[in-house]
Image: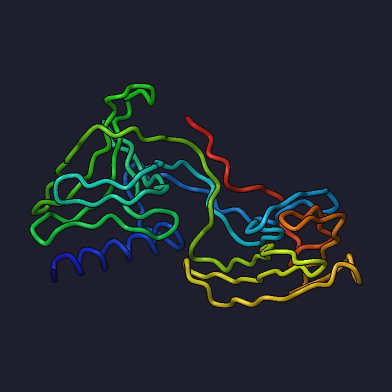
């Protein structure tokens, strides 16, 4: 148990340094791009359903990721589903940080060697049903790989940076003419501010919160069409969330 907890602490430290802050330079290290996000573009009509964000602002990571669609267990290692940021390459493999963009870490049993990354063969085709995902470990100073077939995806993605503050307004519901929204602030994958507020759309079609200004064009009990007049602050307009396969 102690070894497992220490391993988790080490992985958490890696996730902070490589996902959110200054990382130690590695041979053939991969340099991801940090980009400011302001969503959506102003004065463009958008339609959302319950639970969708209507406004978002923050810093995002733009880079190459390994996508694991379902969690699985390989030997003494548990690999969560999620997107794993590329950290570098060697002669054979593309290597990824063993922590997803949502903060879920690869874990291992007390008898296993600590994980230093996930890896895929640089020569493997994504169309090969026998393509493998490998767990790279540190065994007494030597790198060891444990591989098994898994239908991964490898591609480009823009996703949330856990080390930066993110703000969002979320459309919750509409009952009659009363629309309910949630305002959230997140830092390091934790919600640090969570508020809800109501707007009577029969009385006002333009409303503001935390500096953002929204105009509602139409609505139903389950959807809302609107346009953003101004965001929390002005940033580059880059839409996140689309996984582009390589």
| Residue occupying image coordinates x 68% and y 53% | 49
Task: Work out which residue is located at the far front of the displayed protein and give it.
Answer: 176
Looking at the rendering, in which quadrant would you find the N terminus?
bottom left
Look at the picture and state if 6 lies above or below 153.
Answer: below
**Relative side of 90 to 245, left or right:** left
**Relative side of 86 to 204, left or right:** left
Q: In the image, residue 174 lies at what x, y percent?
A: 74, 64
Q: Is the image coloured rainbow, by chain, by secondary structure, or in one colour?
A: rainbow
Q: In the image, residue 123 lies at what x, y percent?
A: 32, 24
| Residue occupying image coordinates x 68% and y 65% | 169
Task: Work out which residue is located at the far right of the displayed protein and give it.
Answer: 203
Look at the picture and state if 102 lies above or below 240.
Answer: below
Instruction: From the viewer's side, name the closer residue of 94 and 25.
Output: 94
**Relative side of 6 to 245, left or right:** left
Look at the picture and state if 123 lies above or below 166.
Answer: above
**Relative side of 197 to 145, left or right:** right
| Residue occupying image coordinates x 43% and y 42% | 65
Q: In the image, residue 227 lies at what x, y percent?
A: 83, 55
Q: In the image, residue 163 lies at what x, y percent?
A: 49, 66
Instruction: Answer with the quarter of the image where residue 90 lies.
Output: top left
| Residue occupying image coordinates x 40% and y 57% | 18
Instruction: From the viewer's side, name the closer residue of 121 and 127.
Output: 127
Tally of numbered tags = 0
Instruction: From the viewer's side, name the closer residue of 124 and 149.
Output: 149
């Amino acid at each position: 148990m102690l070894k497992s907890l220490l391993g988790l602490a080490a992985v958490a430290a890696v996730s902070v340094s490589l996902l959110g802050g200054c990382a130690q330079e590695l041979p053939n290290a991969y340099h991801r791009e940090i980009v400011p996000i302001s969503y959506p573009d102003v004065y463009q009509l958008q339609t959302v359903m319950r639970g969708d964000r209507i406004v978002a602002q923050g810093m995002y990571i733009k880079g190459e990721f390994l996508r694991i669609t379902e969690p699985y267990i390989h030997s003494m290692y548990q690999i969560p589903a999620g997107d794993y940021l590329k950290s570098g390459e060697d002669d054979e493999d593309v290597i990824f940080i063993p922590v997803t963009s949502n903060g879920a870490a690869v874990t291992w049993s007390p008898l296993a060697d600590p994980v230093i990354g996930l890896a895929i063969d640089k020569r493997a085709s994504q169309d090969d049903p026998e393509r493998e995902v490998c767990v790279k470990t540190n065994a007494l100073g030597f790198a060891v790989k444990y591989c098994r077939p898994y239908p991964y995806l490898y591609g480009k993605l823009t996703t949330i940076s856990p080390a930066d503050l993110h703000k969002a307004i979320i459309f919750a519901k509409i009952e009659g003419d009363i629309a309910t929204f949630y305002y959230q602030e997140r830092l390091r994958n934790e919600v640090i501010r969570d508020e809800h507020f109501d707007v009577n759309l029969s009385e006002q079609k333009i409303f503001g919160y935390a500096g953002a200004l929204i105009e509602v064009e139409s609505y139903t009990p389950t959807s809302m069409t609107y346009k953003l007049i101004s965001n929390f602050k002005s940033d580059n307009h880059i839409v996140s969330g689309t996984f582009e396969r390589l």
